[in-house]
Image: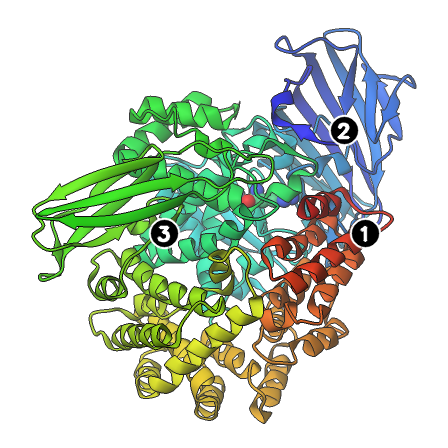
Amino acid sequence: QLIQREDYAPFAWLVPEVALRFDLGIERTRVHSALTVQRNARANTAEFIRLEGDGITPLEVTVDGEAINSWSMDDGDLMVPLSGDTHQIEIVTEIDPSANTQLMGLFASNGMLCTQCEAEGFRRITFFPDRPDVLSVYSVRMSGSKDQFPILLCNGNLKASGERPDGTHWAEWHDPWPKPSYLFALVAGDLVANRDTFTTSSGREVELAIWVRDGDLERTDHAMDSLKRAMKWDEETFGREYDLDTFNVVAVSDFNMGAMENKGLNIFNTKYVLADRATATDGDYDAIEGVMAHEYFHNWSGNRVTCRDWFQLSLKEGFTVLRDQLFSQDMGSESVKRIEDVRVLRAVQFPEDSGPLAHPIRPDSYREISNFYTSTVYNKGAEVIRMMRTMCGPERFRSGCDLYFDRHDGQAATCEDFITAIEDGAGLDLRQFRLWYRQAGTPKVKVRLEHDGDTATLHLSQDVPPTPGQPEKLPVPIPLRLALFDRESGEHEGEQLVILEHAQASLTFSGFAAPPVLSINRGFSAPVAIERDTPVEDLVFLAANDDDPFARYEAMQDLVVAYLRDAASGALASERRAAGQQAILSAFASAVTDEALDDLMRGELLILPGHSYISEQLAVADPLAIHQEREGLKALLGSRLQTEFAAMHARASAISDGSDAVARGARKVKTQALVYLAAGVPERAKEIAAAQYDTATNMTDRLGALMVLAGLRSPERTDKILDFYTRFRDNPLVIDKWFAIQAQSLHPDVIEHVKALAKHPDFNIRNPNRVRSLFMAFTGAPQGFHAASGEGYRLIADLILELDPINPQTAARFVAPLGRWRRTERDRATLMRAELERISKAPKLSRDTFEQVTRSLG
Ligand code: ARG
Ligand code: ZN
């Protein structure tokens, strides 16, 4: 059944209060729910109330204290006839958390009980109007074995607790803030806490606790520091203060997503909580800081102001991603963070936008909402709001946000509400800009610079490509930050912000006796694909001179992307090939040696554009050709610049111990040096990598070295892979890395490795982290996933079929890599399509996988 955005109607009933009682057990949990319901004056009247359910049956239903049997079931939902204007409904259900392999609703993880209710998990616990526009105040009483569940946590504030002689204990929690059911959470288990406090700007003291399993406590400090920094930053930057006496965070190892912002009780994937230098990489540290902040920021952008319906998901997710990005920019290097965010957008969201799963940041229809927790809704959603901020500046944007929070506090709002608040509060006219919410597809912007006399003319044109269900598009306003450089002095006279509103525009700039060099979309001011016919020497100029760090990175990328695109499509004559290589070599040589660069930034300049981003440049791509050209370029760089890379490695090794930015930068370039050396001079690289592995004092160095070795055929490879496993066999998060590094490696036998790893005793198809670390990683190994035999595609299709009955939400995530068939070379496209068809014919496909496969087949 297709759900349409246009069909929204308010619910016929309000549920101002909910009282829940849980008798907890891993195999049997009894749930007693009491709802106070009132007719909603703003909705159509109804003779019954529909309480949604998924896989549960009512054991008892009472209305106003009397047991009734006039209820009925409609496709899993409970229909209760109601005649008056207010009623009290009580329902008893029973669930088996240990059998909940979907990890939605109440489930068991390592002997503890926890919940995930967003988007539609609450209906797997009890019958309820499980939609975000029904806001209720929750009181919860939970009880269970004190032995098994010494800790009992829920949303809000703890009101009372006690013990009974039978070995059980209980706790009562109350959350004063009305919330939708998707923000409900409960945790019961044997946990220990890292405790701290935070005093808010108005002087209220908040008890903070991060709950983990015994033994993990020492690895929670970074998460706690990140949380406190996020709380402070949100007060300073957005004027948002925390609003409860306690803030609890619980780490669980079985989790479909990264984390969840349940009111006062965030639940996290352990991956985004636990870290120490020996077991977590610098990237992991950054991710923890970012996700901690993200979930905390939801307390305002998501919880205090929530979504009217799930089509508005980007209202909270796009905005909250922008907020966490701005936070991380402030905590570390602004430009490096910006580059990283753009890299993710291009690697994941651009392909989504150009493929069969393309959808606007505010979708128009869905079958299964879990499928719309996408990079488009999250990351493009953040970019769209960032553009608003760019157009009005941070101060006016803040006024717009203040107005939004003020106006809609306590409400379930829409994207339209957000846009209107920014218009009113920031004084922007966003009438045409709203198209960014409606239209899917990455706009293409063509840029041409002409020069005549002392005038430079910039010709801009835009085109939003057709996407499934949206054949025709209108031009969108595109804010472009740009600068024109004087070739001689290497300088420009100030940056400008140009907003391309129409399909075409020409702008003139006078005072240029010689043709200037154009730097455009600086800071990635708009999430568009720029097509510029910039001469190679101009890109080299920008790569060396641009004062906007993003633009400098971009010039390097453009240089390489153009080369690889043409090389991989066979469009590069040998003369141009040599010239392209020469330009890239010299740009890399200066990036390696430029003393004005810090290593974190140098590290960014030295990253080659990813496989998926290069494929994006071609209408139809041959994945193996791209892979080979990309590896070939790495080998060329590694061999021709081997002295420089080796020297960089040695220089960085001397300063790479520590947790400051200098050491982190050093670690980043160390492993990059290894990556290039391994491609160009593998014998030499093996030695350096083995030494880096052996002497590593931290996971960043150790894993970097292992990654490089994992791609090479050598005794060191076998040796270190075994060593790594033995060292870390008791740490699941590190063993995830061990799976991933092998599954994503450049090794020619990667398929065999993946098959063997799937049979490894530590592989567990019920654990999403483990599944992703083996199979999602594998989709990133082009020589394996895209093997001409089709074996890589078959492996993923087999996984989808096996995982779908266990965990449909996670299974459905694996469809997208196969869905790229239309943009893939013909023989492979046939194989990919055949696998999709095989999946589609499976007898009992989940709604999740069915929707993704159907859309992918088109
Ligand atoms: N709201 C969570 C976050 O982004 C994600 C929850 C996703 N849940 C799901 N079932 N898809 O912070
Ligand atoms: Zn979120």
Q: Which residue is mark 1?
A: 805
Name the residue type under label 1: Pro
When asked about the image quadrant of residue 332, the answer is: bottom left
Viewport quadrant of the N terminus: top right
Taking the image as drawn, is residue 204 in sight? yes
Residue drawn where x is 33% and y is 86% of the image? 650
Q: Quadrant of the C terminus?
A: top right
Question: Tag 1, which secondary structure?
Answer: loop
Badge 3 is on which residue? 531
**Callout 2 amino acid:** Glu
Q: Tell me the mark number nearer the camera, choosing from 1 and 3.
A: 3
Count every numbered label the image shows and give the total.
3
Question: On screen, 609 above or below 845?
Answer: below
Pointer 2 local density, CA inside 10 Å: few below 14, some 14–19, many at least 20:
many
Residue type, numbered disc 3:
Glu
Residue 201 makes an appearance in the image: no
Relative to 419, 485 lies left or right: left
